[in-house]
Amino acid sequence: MSVMDEYIKIVQDAITKYLKLVFERKFNKQICDSYIKTYIDVRYYNVNERGNHRTLRKEILESLKEKKKRLIVDNKSKQLLIENMEMFFIYVLYIDKVTPYKTIDYLVKNICRLRVKILKKEDEKFRKLLKDLIEDDIKKKEEYLKKFDSKVFSLKLTDYNSTNEVQRVSLKYHMKFSTIFSATAIERAFNTGTTSEDKLFVEYNMISAQIIKDIIKGNFKKQYIVEFADSLFEKKQKITRLLNIIDNSALQDKLSIKIRHETFLKYREDAYEMLRSGYKIALIADETIDTDRAELEKLKMFKYILINKDAPYYEEITRKKRLQNIIEI
């Protein structure tokens, strides 16, 4: 299960518990799950059912309204329950930090008022259970994301010169070594052999948590390019374990894996399989690249093409204007 899948499961569980608490015996799992899917699709996967609205909140509300209409068409006998569940689902936007609110007590008070108005139910036990549920949900989400914090490692996010919407990701270590080791020797040890592979597990987990934080804030534009180790193509189980960390379309949409063109040619079928599985590749141009127009057209399959401005093939590639996904490095 990817980092994002685990976080979304926390969200789904909290929403289900919330609606179960509100509706008690009238709770309908099928209706609940339908609303949850619509909500998750827009909130975390940025799937627009109606088109572009000014805010994420409006987009979610419009999508829930459309889902309500379709549910009623398919379940006429449950129209009242479908409508009521949608009304209470609106408060999920507060619970899940789409819409800000004053305090938890204020939020609980408003939900209780709606419950009295719609369901004619009022009791102090519900109020307490609801507050506990919201506080527990906040705690679970915060603790989950804190798992990816580290005193030993941190992510360095650097803008590329030609764009401010894509950042280069690198893993930095904060360990003290004896002075008998030179900085060069330490850096070489950190970036070669199995260590260069193993550190990617830390990097991919940490950048996944960063993307979740971006999405929570409603930022779907930020893109990241992560490191990769060529040697992993020879280790099927290890590469599978690594890619499973980001095996989620919300993460895949914002992450590109950095691979040299020479490496792509050597492991072409493996790279194609990555692309078919939804992973994005940022191809590093090198001397093996063919600047023929037909060959350049093929490079459009990659999310980005990273090219050194001083490379002898740079001018020829940019002059032909076949690629719009170039990033200068």
Image (cartoon, rainbow, N blue to C red):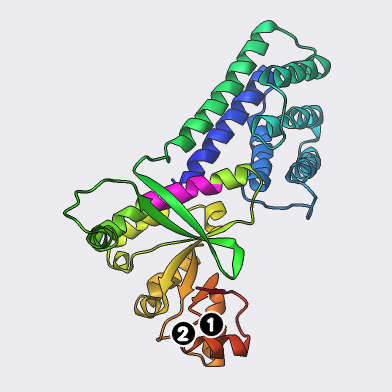
Q: 128 or 73, which is in the foreground?
A: 128
Work out which quarter of the rendered image holds the N terminus and state it.
top left
Q: Main secondary structure of the magenta part?
A: helix
Judging by the rendered image, the residue that carries numbered circle 2 is 311
Q: 269 or 173, which is in the foreground?
A: 173
Q: Is residue 168 magenta?
A: no
Q: Is residue 237 visible?
A: no
**Disc 2 and disc 1: Cα gap in Å?**
20 Å
Amino acid type, callout 1: Lys
Q: Which residues are magenta?
A: 202-211
Residue at image point 61% right, 14% down: 129
- Work out whether 38 lies above or below 248: above
Task: Say which element carries label 1.
Answer: helix
- Work out whether 49 lies above or below 9: below
Nearer-N-terminus badge (2/1) = 1
Q: Is residue 183 left or right of residue 79?
A: left
Residue at image point 69% right, 37% down: 98
Q: Is residue 191 visible?
A: yes
Task: Say which element carries label 2.
Answer: loop
Residue at image point 38% right, 70% down: 270
Spot occupied by residue 6 in the image (x, y as percentages of width and height) = 48, 40
Residue at image point 51% right, 47% down: 210
Which numbered disc covers residue 298?
1
Q: Residue furthest top?
A: 124
Q: Image quadrant of residue 65?
A: top right
